[in-house]
Each structure stands twice: as structure tokens, then as C-alpha cells.
Image (cartoon, rainbow, N blue to C red):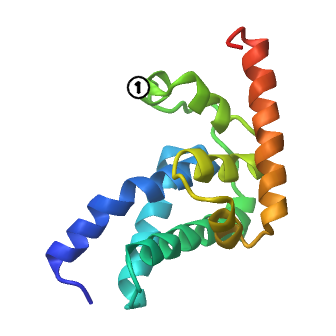
């Protein structure tokens, strides 16, 4: 188990990455915060030794993706209804660049690979490992996601 300084350093290094991945998929601040907290707790309980920081980062991304999947497919979530009347804080939406907004609006299957590739700078091979997909599938999802983004940007007069 790490000391308090080590835990604080881990949170400082990785919490925002975990949150961004969770928010990209969940599209909800509260759910993204819950997943971030859950992943960090899993890390603390795992008592795992890592070869290096890259290994730790990849493990955290894998646990984040798995936690998101568990959350999305949980019985509790299947029996809840979204509160359409509740909006996210306006500063969240207004601070996002146009491109990031467009990425967040992509269909689910394209959103995570695009985010991991462009915002977390993972390679196709790393994304395939983290998402338990083939490299060909990841390349295909990235290609289709890029085309969707291009089409959206053209429609809005950006390209």
C-alpha cells in the first residue's frame, strides 16, 4: 500500500485522465466522477506492482474501461430514466472546443477510441489492448470516426 503522499501524487497524475475517459463515455459529470472514484479505489485495493508508469497508466485505463462497461450494463442503470430536464453546468459545455464537442457527440463505439487516440495519445496497439479489440477494429473505428467528424465539421462550415 502506498503512503499518503504517493496516493496524492497518483490522484494528481491520473484522476483527470480517468475522469476524461469516463466523461467521454458517460456524458454525465456525476457518473464520470463516480467512475473516477471507483477506479481509484480499485487501484488502492489492488495492491499491484507495476513495471513502470506506462504499465500503471495502461492498467488504470483498462480498469476505467471495464468499470464503465460494468456501470453501463448494471441492472440499476437499466432500470433508471435520464432526467432530461436537468442540464449540465453551463461552464462545462461552453468551455469545450468545437472539435471536442463533436467527438463527444459521436456514437459510443467511435467515441472511446477517438478520445484515447487523440486526447490520451495512445497508439492503435495500446487502444486495442485496452478495449480488448483487434488493431484492425481500432483502425476501422478511428477511420469511420474521423469521417463522421469531417462530415459534421463540413456541415457546420468549419471545413
For this view, does 52 lie left or right of residue 136?
A: left
Which residue occupies 17% across, 83% down?
Answer: 3
Name the image quarter holding the N terminus. Answer: bottom left
Using a 10 Å C-alpha cutoff, classify the residue at mark 1 as few (fewer than 14 neighbours), some (14 to 19) or many (20 or more): few
- In the rendered image, residue 151, in percent from the top left (x then y), is placed at 81, 23
Comparing 27 with 105, the one in front is: 105
Residue 12: which quarter of the image? bottom left
Residue position for label 1? 91
Residue 122: which quarter of the image? bottom right
In this view, 147 is above or below 63: above
Which residue occupies 72% across, 12% down?
Answer: 156
For this view, does 148 lie left or right of residue 159?
A: right
Which residue occupies the extreme top position in the image? 157
Name the image quarter holding the C terminus. Answer: top right
In this view, 112 is above or below 134: above
- In the rendered image, residue 56, in percent from the top left (x then y), is placed at 43, 76
Mark yes or no: residue 25 visible: yes
- In the rendered image, residue 136, in percent from the top left (x then y), is placed at 84, 61
For this view, does 17 lie left or right of residue 130?
A: left
Comparing 51 with 8, the one in front is: 51
Mark yes or no: residue 26 visible: no
Which residue occupies 74% across, 30% down?
Answer: 149
- Mark count: 1
In this view, 73 is above or below 116: below
- In the rendered image, residue 92, in percent from the top left (x then y), is placed at 45, 31
Badge 1 element: helix
Amino acid at each position: 500500500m502506498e503512503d499518503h503522499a504517493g496516493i496524492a501524487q497518483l490522484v494528481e497524475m491520473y484522476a483527470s485522465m480517468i475522469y476524461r475517459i469516463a466523461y467521454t463515455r458517460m456524458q454525465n459529470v456525476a457518473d464520470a466522477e463516480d467512475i473516477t472514484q471507483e477506479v481509484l479505489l480499485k487501484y488502492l485495493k489492488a495492491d499491484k506492482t507495476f513495471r513502470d508508469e506506462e504499465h500503471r497508466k495502461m492498467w488504470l485505463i483498462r480498469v476505467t474501461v471495464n468499470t464503465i462497461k460494468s456501470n453501463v450494463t448494471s441492472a440499476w442503470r437499466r432500470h433508471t430514466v435520464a432526467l432530461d430536464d436537468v442540464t449540465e453546468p453551463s461552464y462545462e459545455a461552453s468551455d469545450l472546443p468545437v472539435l471536442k464537442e463533436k467527438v463527444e457527440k459521436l456514437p459510443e463505439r467511435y467515441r472511446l477510441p477517438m478520445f484515447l487516440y487523440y486526447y490520451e495519445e495512445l497508439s492503435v496497439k495500446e487502444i486495442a489492448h485496452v478495449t480488448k479489440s483487434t488493431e484492425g477494429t481500432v483502425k476501422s473505428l478511428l477511420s469511420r470516426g474521423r469521417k463522421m467528424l469531417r462530415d459534421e465539421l463540413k456541415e457546420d462550415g468549419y471545413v
